[in-house]
Amino acid sequence: MSDPSAPPGRELLLALQLLDRQIVDRHGKLAGKVDDLEISLPSGGGPPVVTALLTGRGALADRLGGRLGRFAAALSRRLVAGDRERPGRVPVSRIADIGNHVTVALDADEMPTYAVEAAVRHGIVEHIPGSGVKGA
Amino acid sequence: MNKVLGITLGILTAMGGFVDIGDIVANSETGARFGLGLAWAVVVGVIGICVFAEMAGRVAAVSGRPVFDLVRERLGAKVGLVNLLASFFITFLTLTAEIGGIALALELASDVNYLLWIPVAGLAVWLVIWRVKFESMEQIFGLMGLVLVVMAVALWRLGPDWSDLAHQAAHPAVPHGEGHATYAFWAIALFGAAMTPYEVFFFSSGAVEEGWSRRDLMLNKANVFIGFPLGGVLSLTLMGLTAVVFQPAAVSVGSLSQSALPVSLAVGKLGLALVIIGFFAATFGAALETGLSCGYTISQYFGWPWGKRVRPREAARFHLLVLVALGVAVGVGLTAVDPIKVTEYSIVLSAAALPLTYLPILLVANDRDYMGESANRWLSNLLGSVFLVVLVVVAAVTIPLMIVTKAGS
Amino acid sequence: MSAFPDRLRLSDLLGAEICGEDGRHVGVVHDVVAVQAGPLTTGFDAALELRALMVGPRGIRARLGMSPAHARGPWLARLLALPGRQTDPIPWSAVTAVEPGRIVVGAISR
């Protein structure tokens, strides 16, 4: 929900305060980092707007660039079924708060990066006895 | 009682940081070759790790974020990635050495060849990471390692010339038969072994695993200022033992059984049994630290869920990483590569990567957005900055020295 | 604006060279200032609008992806910020075109 303490017109330095920050879901679970931001021109005119957080599925590899980066990105997108063309998107409307991490009004399971975690969980980890028991 | 046990995180980290296989090797060898002439390097290392571990623990307690999590934010994704690759590689190398170390300790206890113990060690470490509660893990291995106090008993019973030992420590000098470059190399090795990056990765992640908050800032200080110096004292005691027993005979130390010899000479079979238990506990603790840190570093860079405080299925990629790292470490160990050699290389390479690890800690500890009123005061900043300069110098000369001295031979 | 790519990401702007319309090199983008303003969307306070570009000289820090503001703290850390003479932010209204690796700005009061 909107942060009542943030005054309207709050300024943000995108690279310093948003990029590479931890994303946390509505339950406090870790859900990836902000690998990049999607920016578009609104159809009604005006300055460009940040429309989504990009996380996982090659977004970081795209950003780090170079041939190695693009190869890694393509590989990562092929490994998991889904939209082959695009990295994981979290629309800006789903951001609940920006502080020292970014809280999103989503469950980690709903997020695009969940696919790999789920694949590892169901494919491997769940088969090992004791995977449902808290180890702390 | 719980308050007393509350410092076991610091003790375990220090065990793994000061008397793991790398330190056992480095302290034994330098004691035999240089007497206590390199004791100052350990002391400087203890001060350094205390300064930075206190900062890292404070950051973790106040912000809920462990060190490596912040590396990417602070250094940027590119430099952070370089840091990740270097840190992971070195931590993994150390893990391989520690698995070897566990196997060597078990060989010492059983007369069964260490190669046969390697898969057992790997499996045991994995089982503990998979099932044992973080707190229990700390308490068991931290306290078990404390039996190494028998080394102090042994030193006292050997009845050395204390004033001579004190003189050696206070007036560092290069003994006959050793070169200045070799002396410098071993100084760096000892210093690097005291400040290995995985100690802060583990300590700060452990603080988050334990759920430390602002109320635990004093606990953080207790952990650091009791645990780490304790580890330092133990490693200096080992140096003293080999100095007293081996240096006069100009014998150099190359095996774990030689490191244990002074204690068995002075305290007999019971002493030997205790020191073997202690070595086992310390190397096992270090294997736990490095194994978990292999998972912590990568997971924290990418923002994946990590840690033992959630069910394994909730941190699937983290646990898979740890499992694979242990598997590969066992595989490498089984190629019969000498764990002692692997250790020496891992210490030296750690020394080369130190500035990249410690700079982000210093930066975040000063950031008022994260730390509020708990941000660094002038003393932490002064010490932190001085050490950072030292670390950069050390990092610059490490690899050339290693080449020139052929790794300290 | 004469040119704006279809799919733009922040990483396309960071590190891009800023030139005047005459081709004069102005600097390299270190960061982007955004402001919560504009139409409300559900959940988040308001849309994040780009307001200005933070510019500095070309340098190793820019290539490493660190902005000068990254280095806060004790004097040693501020050494990292030294080589960067911070220039004033360039308002987005002055941008005339966004091309791959390059951003063209029109007249600014400098």
Image (cartoon, helix red, strand yellow):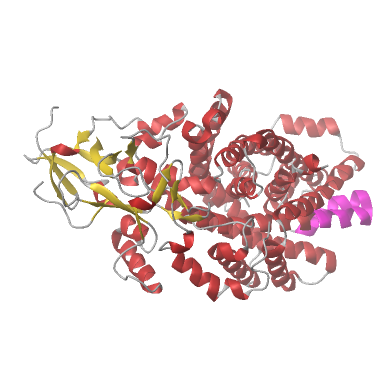
* In magenta stretch: residue B260: yes
Furthest-left residue in this view: C22
x, y (%) of residue A106?
A: 44, 56
Q: Quadrant of residue A133?
A: bottom right
Residue at image position (27%, 46%) is C14
Residue bounds of the magenta highlight: B256-278
C110 lies above or below B333: above
Residue at image position (17%, 55%) is C5
Furthest-top residue in this view: B378
* Residue closest to the eye, C74 or B133: B133
x, y (%) of residue A98?
A: 41, 43
Q: Quadrant of residue B46?
A: top right
Does B352 sit left or right of B182 as displayed? left
* Residue closest to the eye, B121 or C8: C8
Residue at image position (77%, 30%) is B167
Could you tell me if residue A5 is visible in this image? Answer: yes
- Figure disc tally: 0
x, y (%) of residue B407?
A: 59, 52
* In magenta stretch: residue B243: no
Image quarter in which the N terminus of chain B is found: top right
Kindly report the secondary structure that dominates the magenta region of the rendered protein.
helix
B274 lies above or below C110: below
Does B80 sit left or right of C17 as displayed? right
Could you tell me if residue C56 is visible in this image? Answer: no
Does A73 sit left or right of B275 as displayed? left
